[in-house]
Image (cartoon, helix red, strand yellow):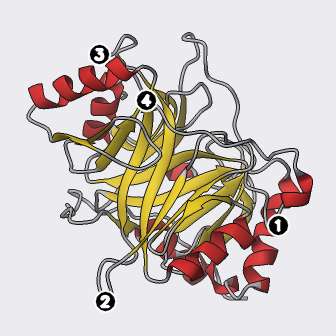
Amino acid sequence: MLPPVNLRPSFNITRSSHVRLTVADLAESRNFYVNALGLVVSDEDERTCYLRGLAEACHHSLVLEQADEGAGAGSCRRIGFRVFFDEDLDAAYAWFRERGLPAEWVDLPHQGRTLHVSDPIGTPLELCAHMETRPRLHIDFERYKGAHAQRLDHYQVFAPDTFELCAFYSELGFRNSEYLEHGDKLLGAFMYRKGTCLDLAIVENTGPALHHFAYTVSESRDIFTACDWAGILGYGDGVERGPGRHGPGGMLFAYLRDPDGHRVEVFNSHYQTIDTEIEPVRWDAASLSTNARWGLPALEKWYFEASPFVGVPQIKPAELPKPMTLERFLLEQPLP
């Protein structure tokens, strides 16, 4: 069911690192991420805001970029991964070029040498080995706002063929903690590099597109705090799903939509997956609603809406998913 994993890849990706989003109103988006989620600003100017979680020492895990007037807002520019050494970037450049995939050196603020690449379906990736640092603020409790988001943890992307994209990232050393299947069809792959159960989730749907990115919180009540502050600040309609508990992973979670519709998850972290003898957990899509034992299914839009990548055409899967949505669940309930 799962493709083989290369445990000694040509270059060493260590973790999910940062995401770059385009927004219609930089001040409004800053307000959401600072005062509802509790991220802190590392640097900003009139067109860009760099944010990080309270427990993060690296300069940014989220970059908000003001879109040009009337165009481009609500898209994702790139998702970023760290590599361990600077020479890993040279190896990555050669590896992508040898396979006919885009690879280009770029100069970006607050990062060391940076490489722009794309995976086989066009997902734009950004690799760097170094980043400026700032003091961690996780015990500066007087600085806490909103949900006290601690660190960026993972991304979930849509892909038209989960197995094919899973095979690509498996060659780069990504391992599966869990996977979702139906019959002999791989529908979801939950992949990691950093030793928890997730850095990149791949789910079959029209893509490439960014379904969500996720920040950890220290305590379960912080998940409710995110929802409370979203409501206080006027973003209550954007509390899209939860609080709840996932089937895969078992984490407590809530999903919120920012002012541009980008979806961000807050959740209370994972189990460890460092040791090589740990086998991935199989989930059967026919018996799973992505909740664990309780809770209603998600709205249809949670399963199908996602942020497009700037300038990247999307591809439909051979068959669109047919999840148990909240709308379908309610229609199928027997009348009293």
- Distance from disc 4 to disc 1, alpha carbons, whole Å, reads 35 Å
Instruction: Give neighbour class at mark 3: few <14, some 14-19, many 20+ (Cα, 10 Å).
Output: some
Q: Residue at x 36, y 77 (%)?
A: 67
Q: Residue 5: give x, y in percent of width and height.
A: 37, 19
Residue at 88% x, 44% y is: 139
- Label 3 to label 4, Cα distance in Å? 15 Å
Mark 4 — residue? 129
Q: Nearer the viewer, residue 254 or 178?
A: 254
The answer to whether the residue labelled 1 contacts the one labelled 2, judged by CB atoms less than 8 Å apart, is no
Q: Answer with mark 3 or mark 1, whichever residue precedes in sequence.
A: 3
What residue is shown with label 3? Answer: 10
Q: Quick one: label 1 or label 2, which is nearer the N terminus?
A: 2
Task: Provide the residue designation for mark 1.
Answer: 224
Inter-mark Cα distance, 4 to 2: 35 Å
Instruction: Using residue 59 as the reference point, say whether residue 204 is left or right of it.
Output: left
Residue 203 seen anywhere in this rendered image of the structure: no
Q: Which mark is residue 70?
A: 2
Give the residue type at disc 3: Ser
| 3 or 2: tag closer to the N-terminus | 3
Q: Secondary structure at mark 4?
A: loop
Question: Mark 4 vs mark 2: which is more N-terminal?
Answer: 2
Question: Could you tell me which quadrant the C terminus lies in?
Answer: bottom right
The answer to which image quadrant residue 138 occupies is top right
